[in-house]
Amino acid sequence: MLTGYWHNFDNPAVELRLRDVPSEYDVVAVAFAEATATPGAVTFAVDPGLSAALGGYTDADFRADVQTLRSRGKKVIISVGGETGRVAVNDAASASAFADSVHALIGRYGFDGVDIDLENGLNPTYMGQALRSLRAKVGANLIITMAPQTIDMQSPAGGYFKLALDIRDILTVVHTQYYNSGAMLGCDQNAAYPQGTVNFIVALACIQLEAGLRPDQVALGLPAGPGAAGGGIVPPSVVNAAMDCLAKGTNCGSFRPPRTYPGLRGAMTWSINWDVSNGNGFARTVKPHLATLP
């Protein structure tokens, strides 16, 4: 599965209508739903700056495009959070507000699920409660993804990691952001690996795989190329090598995981817009490689 984020904003990357997302992407995460004045509740609408940059792009156009992608066999999910996101689910009331508001967005726009990309911390108890409530409303087909930063997945005791383990019976995939990071410990716990290397990606993914997540619940999140991140940008071939190392035990760096993890879920990129800006190299290199994984 190849997941990419779609910008609901105007920045130096190319602006795209949702229907113009390249066909390589299996899951499109719409970035982002935003907090409201009600704690836990979120909302979404097409960004006016994006609409202007596209020469007019309405909510109705967007809703139609969601259905167009779904008719192509793609999944479209709404991502909550982002670097500046301030969504807080810290008690039962905000958990209910989160579940109710995301459910309303799913009904309004036709989203297939939700992505939790809270980069300013989360409460695993109440976010878990919110996600279970949402799944009860939507049903077993609800996609639930998470996009933690590397620091969030160093220990199963951390909030994000605890959430993933607590909801692993309903969790689709965690695509950790292996970028914009300092050096981090891997599952060997005896070396701090620098970002931007096969060792870094594999050794950190190994923590999740050894601490309770299934291989199909782990994907590798990397930047799409120049402009997409401040650090950790690697050629798409490095992403492929890291997946090979984890799934097949080939193309590893100096670090080798204790076992192989066939069924690894694939890759994520920030972002589709940056990938298109850089010539689609990420999608065109990584997507075909997914078919070679066990």
Image (cartoon, rainbow, N blue to C red):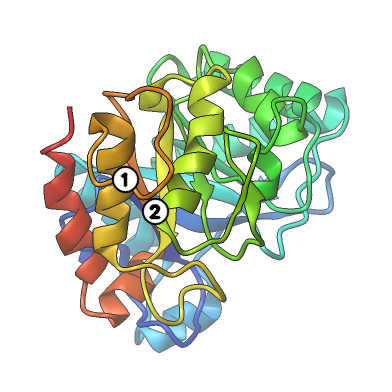
Location of residue 276 (image quadrant): bottom left
Disc 2 designates what residue? 198
Q: Position of residue 6 (x, y in %)?
A: 40, 62
Q: Residue at x 40, y 48 (%)?
A: 254
* Amino acid at the residue labelled 2: Val
Location of residue 30 (image quadrant): bottom left
Mark 2: secondary structure = helix
Q: Nearer the viewer, residue 266 or 16?
A: 266
Q: Position of residue 54 (x, y in %)?
A: 35, 83
Mark 1: secondary structure = loop
Q: Residue at x 83, y 46 (%)?
A: 38
Q: Are marks 1 and 2 in contact (CB under 8 Å)?
A: yes
93 above or below 78?
Answer: above
Q: Residue at x 57, y 60 (%)?
A: 194
Q: Position of residue 269 (x, y in %)?
A: 39, 58
Q: Which mark is residue 252?
A: 1
Q: Residues within 10 Å of mark 1 (few under 14, many from 20)?
A: some
Q: Nearer the viewer, residue 101 or 203?
A: 203
Q: Position of residue 183 (x, y in %)?
A: 64, 58
Task: Classify residue 228 as left or right of residue 97.
Answer: left
Instruction: Count the labels in the image.
Output: 2
27 above or below 113?
Answer: below
Task: Classify residue 148 as left or right of residue 49.
Answer: right
Q: Residue at x 57, y 76 (%)?
A: 230
